[in-house]
Image (cartoon, rainbow, N blue to C red):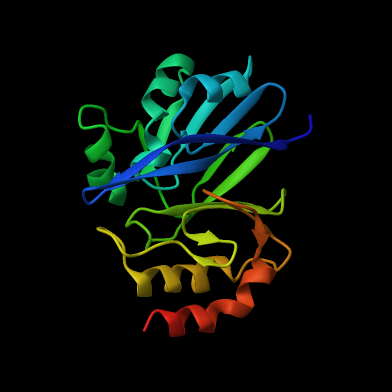
C-alpha cells in the first residue's frame, strides 16, 4: 500500500500575548488507504475528518501548541478516537487553549510515530515554542517543520515562549543536517527544501543581532 501525503488548508485565528491575527494553516495527512496520521489539527475538525474519510486516524501530532495548530485537536480526537501527541514543554501553551483537556501522550525526541507506512521521527526543535518538534520521514524524503522553518527563514520568535538563538540552533543542528533534497512541508505557506534554505543560515543569524 502506497504511503502518501495529503494537504489541507484551514483558516482561523492565531491569538497570543493579547493580539489576534487571521491565519491560514497547513494540515498534513500522512498514511495509506487504511490508516493515517494528522499533523496539526487546525481550526476545522469537520473538514479534517472529511479529508481523512473512512481511514483509521491513529494519531494527531502537534508540532507545537500555539492555538492555531491545536484548536481542532480535541474535537477531532473525540470524533475519531485518535491519540493527541504533544511535546511536554509546550503544555503551558496548550493549557491557554484547552485548560480542561490535556494531550493523550507526550512526544519525545528520537521516537517514531508509525501509521499507514509512514515512519515519522520526532526531532525536538525548540525556539518558536519550547516544545516545538519537526517530524522527519526518511522514506518519504520529507520533514514536516510546523513553524520552525519556512520557505525563506525561521519561524517567528518575537512573542512569549520563543527565543531566536534557540530556533537558529535547532535549525542548524537538527534540520540542516538532513539530506539537501529533503522536502520541507511547513505549518503555513509554501514548501521548500533543506538545500534551498541551508545557504541562508548566516544571513538569518546576522538579522537576529
When the figure is inspected, residue 26 is found, relative to residue 79, above or below; the finding is below
Residue 106 visible in image: no
At 34% from the left edge and 56% from the top edge, which residue is drawn? 129
- Specify whether 201 is left or right of 87: right
The quadrant of the rendering that contains the N terminus is top right
Q: Is residue 200 above or below residue 145?
A: below
Indicate the quadrant containing the C terminus: top left, top right, bottom left or bottom right.
bottom left
Q: Is residue 200 visible?
A: yes
Total marks shown come to: 0
In this view, the residue in front, 5 or 189, is 189
Residue 96: x and y in percent read 23, 40
Q: Nearer the viewer, residue 122 or 13?
A: 13
Question: Is 154 placed left or right of 156 in the picture?
Answer: right
What residue do we see at 50% from left, 72% from top? 173
Q: Which residue lies at the image location 69% right of the left edge and 35% below the top edge?
A: 117
Residue 71, quarter of picture: top left
Which quadrant of the structure image shows residue 170? Answer: bottom left
Measured as percent of width and height from the top left, residue 62 is found at: 43, 41
Q: Give above or below for 202 relative to 191.
A: below
Who's the residue at 70% across and 68% down the image?
180
Rendered view: 53 above or below 111:
above
- Give the image location of residue 195, x and y in percent: 69, 70
Side of 130 relative to 55 (left or right):
left
Depth check: 4 or 202 in front?
A: 202
Q: Position of residue 59 (x, y in %)?
A: 50, 31
Amino acid at each position: 500500500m502506497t504511503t502518501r501525503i495529503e494537504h489541507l488548508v484551514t483558516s482561523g485565528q492565531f491569538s497570543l500575548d493579547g493580539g489576534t491575527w487571521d491565519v491560514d494553516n497547513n494540515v498534513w495527512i500522512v498514511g495509506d488507504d487504511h490508516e493515517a496520521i494528522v499533523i496539526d489539527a487546525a481550526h476545522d475538525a469537520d473538514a479534517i475528518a472529511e479529508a481523512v474519510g473512512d481511514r483509521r486516524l491513529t494519531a494527531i501530532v502537534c508540532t507545537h501548541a500555539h492555538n492555531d495548530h491545536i484548536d481542532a485537536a480535541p474535537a477531532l480526537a473525540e470524533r475519531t478516537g485518535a491519540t493527541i501527541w504533544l511535546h511536554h514543554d509546550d503544555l503551558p501553551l496548550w493549557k491557554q487553549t484547552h485548560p480542561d483537556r490535556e494531550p493523550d501522550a507526550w512526544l519525545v525526541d528520537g521516537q517514531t510515530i508509525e501509521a499507514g507506512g509512514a515512519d515519522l521521527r520526532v526531532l525536538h526543535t525548540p525556539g518558536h515554542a519550547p516544545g516545538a518538534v519537526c517530524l522527519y520521514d526518511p522514506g518519504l524524503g520529507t520533514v514536516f517543520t510546523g513553524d520552525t522553518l519556512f520557505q525563506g527563514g525561521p519561524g517567528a520568535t518575537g512573542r512569549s515562549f520563543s527565543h531566536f538563538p534557540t530556533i537558529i540552533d535547532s535549525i542548524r543542528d537538527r534540520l540542516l543536517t538532513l539530506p539537501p533534497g529533503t522536502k520541507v512541508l511547513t505549518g503555513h505557506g509554501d514548501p521548500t527544501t533543506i538545500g534551498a534554505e541551508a545557504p541562508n543560515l548566516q544571513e538569518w543569524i546576522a538579522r537576529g543581532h
